[in-house]
Amino acid sequence: MKVPLVDLKLQYLSIKPEVDREIKRILDQSAFILGSDIEKFEKKFAKFCGAKYAIGVSSGTRALELALRALDIGKGDEVITTAHTFLATAAAIAHAGAKPVFVDIDSETLNIDERKIEKAVTKKAKAIIPVHLYGNPAKMDEITKIARKHGLNVIEDASQAHGAIYKGKKVGIFGQIGCFSLFPAKNLGAYGDAGILVTSSKGLYQRLNLLRNHGRSGKNKHTLIGYTARLDNLQAAILNIKLSKLNAWNRKRREHAKMYKEFLSDAKEVSFPKETEKSRPVYCYFVIKCSERNKLMKFLKKKGIGASIHYPQPVHLQPAFNFLGYEKGSFPEAERAVKEVLSLPMYPELKKGQIKYVTDQIKKFFWQSQK
Ligand SMILES: *Cc1c(COP(=O)(O)O)cnc(C)c1O
């Protein structure tokens, strides 16, 4: 049996007639930049999140950078984030000209450890970027409380958490701005690079609109120096179809996660990032923790199972951030987690039989290694 990590083709096939029709329509209209499909998608996505406004942009990384710029955060400023995330969270801080300041993770949730944030706050700190890693909401109550106390902005990196719920509300609306990647393999993915921001501040919305479109406030009037960072109209038309399926797809992901956990309940070598009682994760990735991770991954690959690691290196030890001067041992929990985490196949179209096969192989591996 073959079980890939993700299968984007299956999802396309499930919506092919609608998608093909929409692509043809956009090509026939030849309206590629800005326009009604983007506006429709932004309105729908804002409503989906419970925010007043949404702004479609060219990627998740760009969304984060523009969020910082809209809040006037840049040179000389510090932005606090987690040491265990996709590199882009920290890269966006650097792109904006600010300095990333990392904080270790909570070993139970693998999200930023809110108890360690205050120690990282200096006079230069301007914002916190919590990441809802793997689709599991960070502790936003605690984080926004710390932010208020120190006068910091909160920008959520919800790139892996479209539709995840924290205390009854969708993530993305707990701080000033929420940022989402719409990379093909995320819970809501375009057919190429794309991203979106949500906010309920009219001022920030207006600034973000200028920033993504050359700072343009009139046909030939540029009120600030902006970017070519718009969401494509073609992508917006596709995303409109996919957004209407997102709740159902996320429900499937949660069902799969439940099944994985049930089937693995007798494998004492395996544990899972914790779901807190306030949260309903959406499992962008299904991640297990175990020792002998590398050997297990190799074993699963031999069995036709697409296991992968998100992420094998904490951000503070990536060569790109050498200049910040962090050393090994700076964040022990993040450094431990990267040795233990393993992502198993996860996508809405996954079948029960495939999940059974994957979990049987995992148990077989640990059973064999005991002998
Ligand atoms: C995917 C991702 C990003 C970057 O998004 P792009 O659209 O690839 O630029 C940022 N942060 C996290 C946590 C992500 O998973």
Image (cartoon, rainbow, N blue to C red):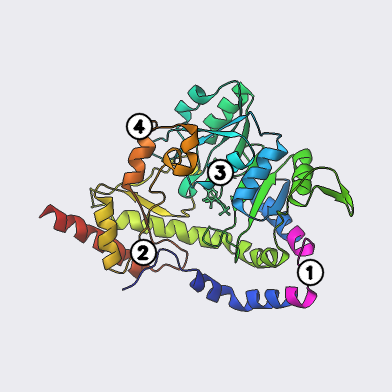
Q: Which mark is residue 91?
A: 3
Which residue lies under the disc numbered 4?
329
The reply, left or right, for residue 83 in relation to residue 143 is: left
Can you tell me whether the CB of the residue at mark 3 lies under 8 Å from the nearest atom of ligand 1? Answer: no
Q: Secondary structure at mark 2?
A: loop
Of the two numbered discs 2 and 3 in the rendering, the one whose residue sits closer to the viewer: 3
Compared to residue 339, the image places residue 256 above or below, namely: below
Label whose residue precedes the other's in the sequence (2 or 3): 3
Q: Which mark is residue 306?
A: 2
CA–CA distance between discs 2 and 3?
A: 28 Å
Q: Is residue 10 visible?
A: yes
- Quarter of the picture containing the C terminus is bottom left
Which residue lies under the disc numbered 1?
31
Q: Secondary structure at mark 1?
A: loop
Residue plotted at (59% across, 43% down): 92
Q: Amino acid at mark 4?
A: Gly
Q: Nearer the viewer, residue 281 or 65?
A: 65
Compared to residue 80, the image places residue 233 above or below, namely: below
Give the class, few, some or many, for how many residues have Cα within 10 Å of label 3's Cα (few <14, many ≥20).
Answer: many
**Residue 169 % position (x, y):** 59, 44
Can you tell me whether the CB of the residue at mark 2 lies under 8 Å from the nearest atom of ligand 1? Answer: no
Q: Secondary structure at mark 4?
A: loop
Is the residue under label 3 in contact with that under label 2 (CB below 8 Å)? Answer: no
Numbered range of the magenta stretch: 26-39
Q: Quadrant of residue 15?
A: bottom right
Q: Amino acid at mark 1?
A: Ala
Is the residue under label 1 in contact with that under label 3 (CB below 8 Å)? Answer: no
The reply, left or right, for residue 364 in relation to residue 166 is: left
**Residue 299 % position (x, y):** 25, 62
Give the class, few, some or many, for how many residues have Cα within 10 Å of label 1's Cα (few <14, many ≥20).
Answer: some
